Amino acid sequence: MSKTVLALVPHPDDAEFFAGGLLANLIAEGARVIIAIASDGRRGSFEHDAESLAKLRRAEAHRAAEALGAEPPIFLNHPDLEVDTLPPGLLREQFIRLIRQVKPDIVVAEDAFAPYEVHPDHRAVAWAASDAIHFASLPLMHPEHLEQGLEAHFVVEKYFYSEHLPNANKIVDISQTIDRKIAALGEHRSQVRFLVEDVMRQAGLAGLDLRALLGEVLDDPLQALAWAMRAQAAEIGQRIGVAYAEAYRYVRFHPFVENLLALQG
């Protein structure tokens, strides 16, 4: 039977940006992929107002999921850059509910234990996802779910990503799917322009002439981001001798169970 995959992410572009290759691999293997997005992404722009941007990013997320081959995304619609101010436990309960509804074999989320994460939405979603993943299997955790017909569910495979991941233990070859990853990420046009402009502004403050250094690649924001994504994936790919790869902290069972499996194995 094909697997079901649930990605729990802070913003509309995070699934494609951090795990697009893995998700495309799983889709190619027949998996059903669902992306749940916590915030509306309304703050990430130098050119749009917040309300217009939120609507735009919602539409872009739909196109990106379609380009990737995933199902239409689920939106929790919390305000961007305010996810960390939600009532304690609210996001965790929403994620537990989603896990019990979707019953995924695999969950992809940001690693709550990775260092140097500066974005408060990322930190909040990472911790809520970690808690939900590990405790959705306990029937006494939100027993009202059981009354609503949602049974406890244990997620077997966990893929945790981060921009800085010193404890990565699984490198995933995405050489066959990096083009699909970039194409899906390219559907987040407003965010691609924002990310590239932000880097260029910082480079200018640092006294760097990026156009002199990188040339025509900067004429097209998507081309610039694609260049950066390929460079990053190529560096990770060198660890296992492939063209392009993504890195994860991969977890299945309790260490005691994993040790027993290793002894049998």
Image: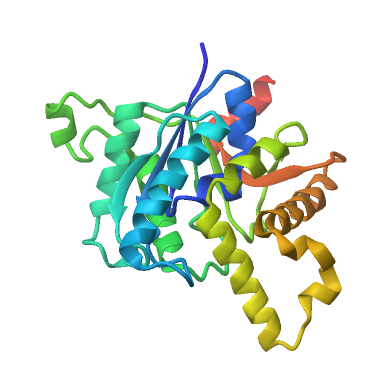
Where is residue 174? Give x, y as percent. 72, 36
In the current view of this chain or complex, which residue is farthest to the top? 1
Does residue 151 appear to the left or right of 42 in the view shown?
left
- Report the residue at 17% width, 28% height from top: 146
The foreground one among 118 and 248 is 118
Task: Pick whichever, 190 or 92, lies toward us.
Answer: 190
Q: Residue at x 59, y 50 (%)?
A: 17
Picture coordinates of residue 217, whole percent (x, y)? 78, 61
Residue appearing at x 57%, y 18% in the figure? 30
Q: Which image quadrant for residue 177?
A: top right
Which quadrant of the view contains residue 261?
top right
Foreground pick, 127 / 223: 223
Give above or below for 226 relative to 84: above
Is residue 8 visible in the rendered structure shown here? no
Q: How many marks do you count on the picture?
A: 0
Residue nearest the viewer, comparing 59 with 73 = 59
Q: Which residue is found at the position 33% from the left and 44% from the top?
A: 75
Where does the image place residue 229, in percent across and percent down from the top left? 71, 53
Colour mode of the rendering: rainbow
In the image, residue 204 sits, relative to residue 159, either above or below, namely below
> Residue 43 placed where, x, y %?
40, 67
Evaluate whether residue 206 shows in this view: yes
Please give left or right for residue 214 compared with residue 138 in the image. Answer: right
Task: Give the position of the C terminus as an image quadrant.
Answer: top right
